[in-house]
Image (cartoon, helix red, strand yellow):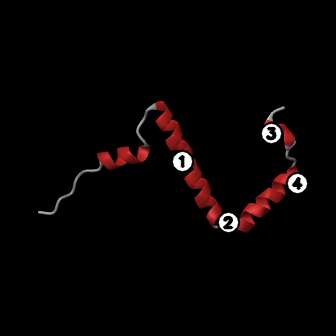
């Protein structure tokens, strides 16, 4: 028996309750920050699996070096 079969399937009411609990715990302002961080982490993980450099490093390398005279 698969481990997820023990919990059954989630219906609409259960998802609403879970969403309300998440909003209560983290607050409405923190949820976009958490989602953004999770998305960046997933993108970084996928790019590392493909052997690519993270997008943030490429931008830093392309920026010209500024030195004061």
Q: Residue 57: x, y in percent?
A: 37, 46
Point out which mark residue 13 bears: 4
Q: Are marks 2 and 4 in contact (CB under 8 Å)?
A: no
Q: Is residue 9 visible?
A: no
Picture layout, residue 8 above or below residue 25:
above
**Marks 3 and 4, Cα distance to the nearest angstrom?**
19 Å
Name the secondary structure under disc 1: helix
Q: Quadrant of the C terminus?
A: bottom left
**Marks 2 and 4, Cα distance to the nearest angstrom?**
20 Å
Name the secondary structure under disc 3: helix
Point out which mark residue 26 bears: 2
Q: Earlier in the sequence, mark 2 or mark 1?
A: 2
Q: Quadrant of residue 27?
A: bottom right
Q: Is residue 22 left or right of residue 56?
A: right
**Marks 2 and 3, Cα distance to the nearest angstrom?**
26 Å
For mark 4, does the 10 Å Cα neighbourhood hold few (<14), some (14 to 19), or many (20 or more) residues? Answer: few
Residue at x 44%, y 32% (from the top left corner): 51
Q: Quadrant of the N terminus?
A: top right
Q: Residue 55: x, y in percent?
A: 42, 44
Which label lies toward us, 3 or 1? 3
Q: Which residue is mark 1?
A: 41
Name the secondary structure under disc 2: helix
| Nearest the eye: 6 or 56 | 6
């Amino acid at each position: 028996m698969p481990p997820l079969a023990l919990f059954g399937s989630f219906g609409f009411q259960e998802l609403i309750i879970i969403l309300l609990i998440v909003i209560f715990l983290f607050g409405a302002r923190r949820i976009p920050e958490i989602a953004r961080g999770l998305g960046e982490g997933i993108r970084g993980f996928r790019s590392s699996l493909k052997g690519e450099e993270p997008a943030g490093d490429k931008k830093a390398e392309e920026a010209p070096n500024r030195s004061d005279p």
